[in-house]
């Protein structure tokens, strides 16, 4: 009996691993997500009933329940080297000449791979089980990030096929954050007033360095394997074969690896990716070219920091040069102080830019950027402009290093560094700078949507002392507005009307407008649907919030804490007394999707999987897990998978997220 249960558990685990392999390595899932979830739930149930059989390599054991205290270090059995860079075809030819010379006339070929812009990681498998994971660090010793790496679903906790017989296999590869996830994460950070990540690479690195792996698990990191570290027995004779063995083990390898017979072919592949790279759903910053034969790699050896058999071809980044006019410090709605570089306007990747966030004061320190400096700016992931280099040789005489503010530049209140020391926060709860940002957010288009209450007016209302909190907005009279600069009769009437109209906004807009940390519009909608009334939400016990499927434990705690704070309750009371009456419309949306069967595939920018399912339901539609001729349309996000092929085969309509948002009247 006990043996039966043990067997059943192991069978379920093996089944799940096979489906992970089909999904992450072959990109050909064979079962719908729901069926996978059912198998997973079955395994979890069995393990809960028989905890003595739980093993760390079980697919249920990815996320550890407790945060760690700090990172230990791991010494790499074989150093993790870096790669020399080239930037043009001539340099690649020179590299090829060096190889030819080093191999003394022997034949050789190359493998060309994408240079994934994430962070290098070394995974150590013993008897096929993932035992630890380390960052590159200084190449000799890295940080032990095992707990966080275990949460990355693309990384198997146990290798497949014949790999178990190997005592040790060290696999090296890149952990990265898909572009869509990076954009979604930064959007969430913007909504909650937290500083943004400069690019997907920093976001991936930041996510791997979190002490709480439950948060890492939500960051949607992924992985591609590209090299071998220590092995007990050689895996193959060629790098090409090694990559194929990786796939057999269940380790994802990017499908666009190419063999090249000579350097001309290498150059051709590299230049084709210079344009193609924009179609990938993760960032690459170049290509990596490797001599294929492992024996030949050994003959060529390494020079200190980097191997001679390998080189990278870096794509030119879209950059521009400009001069820093000032470095300003802005205060966000949650009090975080962000240094911002203001520079002479320049054209960069199609738009004129004149400022760039410097993210935090460590970054300013690292760059040593000063007023008057000539700097190079670049668009990170072609999205956000940032200062990447300071031309120190062009620095005018007499410049001074930027001084980290000792008090809030807005209210002169005290400031404090956060736990990890990177960010400064203004501690004054009455800081007017924070208040202006809070009000701006409150009146914003995705919150209370008060059309004529823009930043300039908010500035005046706060500076004149007319508005000290959200509720004061609703106490304004036309005469108050008329007193302000540049305010004529008509515009004053418009403002008062717009404020008046916002009094009966839907409950979810009201919740979003409060600016609770991590609560954007999607989460606000979920809360409104769940509680249907403001008092119920305000008094919801913590376990009630934790039980909501689409909301994680950290966010649940944030909500709970927010409503336990007397000052916050007072603000809400003030709003209600001033005549604001948030209403929850049960069937608030429409039946735009009535009777429609929709299959969702790939990653969406605005919705998690449970959120999109709920939205479809709210608009009268139904979700199905596989495409058939009864499917009305397929909603395809990034990395859509085989459901999209099936839709094309059957002639089922495919729509993207933008079209979906239009259908439900969101844009
Ligand atoms: S091979 C000794 N292959 O680029 C060679 N590296 O600039 C080991 N990278 O530290 C690395 N994609 O983090 C290799 N296909 C690829 C890669 C790759 C990205 C990263 C890796 C490395 C850095 C060097």
Image: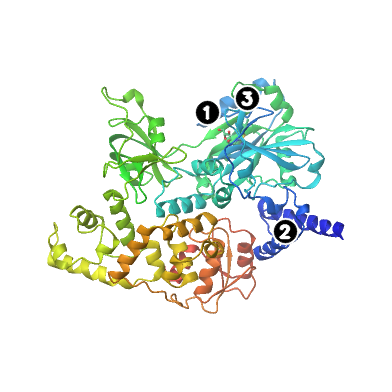
203 vs 494: above or below: above
Is residue 162 visible from the viewing direction of this image?
Answer: yes
Residue nearest the observer in this picture, 292 or 483: 483
Q: At 50% from the left edge and 48% from the top edge, which residue is drawn?
A: 278
x, y percent for residue 170: 71, 36
- The image position of residue 440, as x and y in percent, is 30, 57
- Where is mark 1, residue-wise? 90
**Residue at horizontal 64%, vertical 60%?**
642
Kindly indicate the quadrant of the structure image that contains residue 287: top right
Residue 444 shows in this picture: no
For marks 1 and 3, give the CA distance.
17 Å
Q: Secondary structure at mark 3?
A: loop
Out of 486 and 651, give the one closest to the viewer.
486
Q: Which mark is residue 48?
A: 2
- Which quadrant of the frame does ligand 1 lie within? top right
Judged from the image, the secondary structure of the residue bearing numbered disc 2 is helix
In the image, taking residue 235 as reference, residue 558 lies left or right, namely left
Say the numbered circle drawn on residue 308. 3
Dot 1 or dot 2, earlier in sequence? 2
Query: Which dot marks residue 158?
Result: none
Of tags 1 and 2, the one toward the viewer is 2
- Mark 3 to mark 2: distance in Å? 52 Å
- Quadrant location of residue 120? top right
Position in image of residue 137 (x %, y %): 57, 31
Location of the N terminus by quadrant is bottom right
Q: Quadrant of the C terminus?
A: bottom left
Viewer-nearest of discs 1 and 3: 3
- 380 to the left or right of 261: left
Determine crowd level at label 2: few under 14, some 14-19, many 20+ residues with C-alpha closer than 10 A: few
In this view, the residue in front, 155 or 578, is 578
The mark closer to the camera, 3 or 2, is: 2
């Amino acid at each position: 009996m006990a043996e039966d249960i043990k067997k059943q558990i192991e069978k379920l685990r093996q089944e799940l691993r096979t489906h992970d392999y089909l999904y992450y390595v072959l990109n050909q899932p064979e079962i719908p997500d729901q069926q996978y979830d059912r198998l997973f739930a079955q395994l979890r149930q069995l393990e809960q009933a028989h905890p003595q059989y739980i093993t760390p390599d079980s697919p249920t054991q990815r996320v550890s329940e407790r945060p760690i205290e700090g990172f230990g270090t791991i010494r790499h059995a074989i150093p993790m080297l870096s790669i020399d860079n080239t930037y043009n075809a001539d340099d690649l030819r020179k590299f090829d000449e060096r190889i030819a010379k080093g191999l003394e006339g022997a034949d050789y070929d190359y493998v060309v791979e994408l240079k994934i812009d994430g962070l290098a990681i070394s995974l150590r498998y013993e008897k096929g089980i993932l035992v630890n994971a380390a960052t590159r660090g200084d190449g000799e010793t890295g940080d032990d990030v095992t707990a966080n790496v275990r949460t990355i679903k693309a990384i198997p906790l146990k290798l497949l096929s014949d790999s178990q017989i190997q005592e040790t296999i060290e696999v090296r590869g890149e952990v990265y954050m898909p572009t869509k996830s990076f954009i979604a994460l930064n959007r969430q950070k913007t909504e909650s007033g937290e500083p943004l990540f400069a690019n997907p690479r920093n976001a991936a690195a930041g996510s791997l360095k979190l002490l709480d792996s439950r948060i890492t698990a939500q960051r949607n990191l992924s992985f591609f394997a590209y090299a071998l570290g220590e092995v007990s027995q050689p895996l193959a004779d060629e790098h090409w074969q090694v990559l194929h063995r990786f796939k057999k083990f269940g380790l994802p390898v990017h499908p666009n690896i190419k063999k090249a017979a000579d350097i001309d072919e290498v150059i051709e592949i590299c230049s084709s990716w210079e344009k193609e790279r924009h179609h990938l759903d993760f960032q690459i910053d170049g290509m990596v070219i490797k001599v294929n034969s492992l024996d030949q790699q050994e003959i060529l050896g390494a020079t200190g920091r980097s191997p001679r058999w390998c080189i990278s071809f870096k794509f030119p980044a879209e950059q521009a040069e400009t001069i820093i006019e000032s470095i300003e410090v802005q205060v966000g709605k949650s009090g975080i102080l962000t240094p911002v570089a203001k520079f002479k306007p320049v054209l960069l990747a199609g738009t004129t830019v004149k400022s760039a966030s410097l993210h935090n004061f460590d970054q300013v320190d690292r760059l040593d950027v000063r007023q008057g400096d000539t700097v190079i700016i670049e668009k990170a992931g072609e999205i956000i402009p940032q200062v990447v280099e300071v031309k120190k040789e062009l620095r005018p005489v007499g410049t001074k290093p930027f001084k980290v503010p000792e008090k809030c530049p807005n209210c002169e209140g005290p400031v404090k560094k956060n736990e990890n020391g990177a960010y400064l926060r203004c501690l004054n709860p009455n800081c007017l700078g924070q208040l202006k940002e809070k009000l701006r957010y409150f009146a914003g288009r995705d919150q209370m949507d008060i059309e004529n209450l823009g930043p300039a007016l908010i500035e005046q209302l706060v500076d004149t002392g007319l508005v000290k909190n959200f509720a004061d907005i609703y106490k304004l009279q036309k005469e108050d507005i008329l007193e302000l600069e540049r305010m004529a009769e008509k515009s004053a009437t418009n403002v008062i009307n717009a404020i008046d109209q916002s009094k009966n906004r839907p409950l979810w807009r009201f919740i979003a407008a409060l600016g609770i940390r991590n609560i954007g519009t999607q989460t606000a909608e979920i809360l409104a649907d769940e509680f249907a009334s403001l008092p119920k939400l305000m008094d919801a016990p913590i376990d009630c919030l934790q039980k909501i499927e689409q909301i994680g434990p950290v966010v649940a705690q944030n909500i709970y804490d927010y409503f336990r704070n007397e000052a916050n309750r007072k603000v809400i009371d003030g709003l209600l007394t001033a005549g604001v009456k948030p209403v929850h419309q049960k069937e608030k949306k429409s039946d735009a999707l009535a009777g429609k069967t929709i299959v969702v595939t790939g990653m969406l920018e605005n919705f998690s999987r449970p959120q999109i399912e709920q939205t479809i339901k709210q608009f009268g539609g139904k979700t199905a897990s596989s495409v058939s001729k009864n499917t009305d349309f397929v909603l395809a996000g990034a990395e859509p998978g085989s459901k999209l092929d099936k839709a094309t085969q059957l002639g089922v309509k495919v729509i993207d997220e933008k079209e979906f948002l239009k259908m439900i009247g969101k844009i």
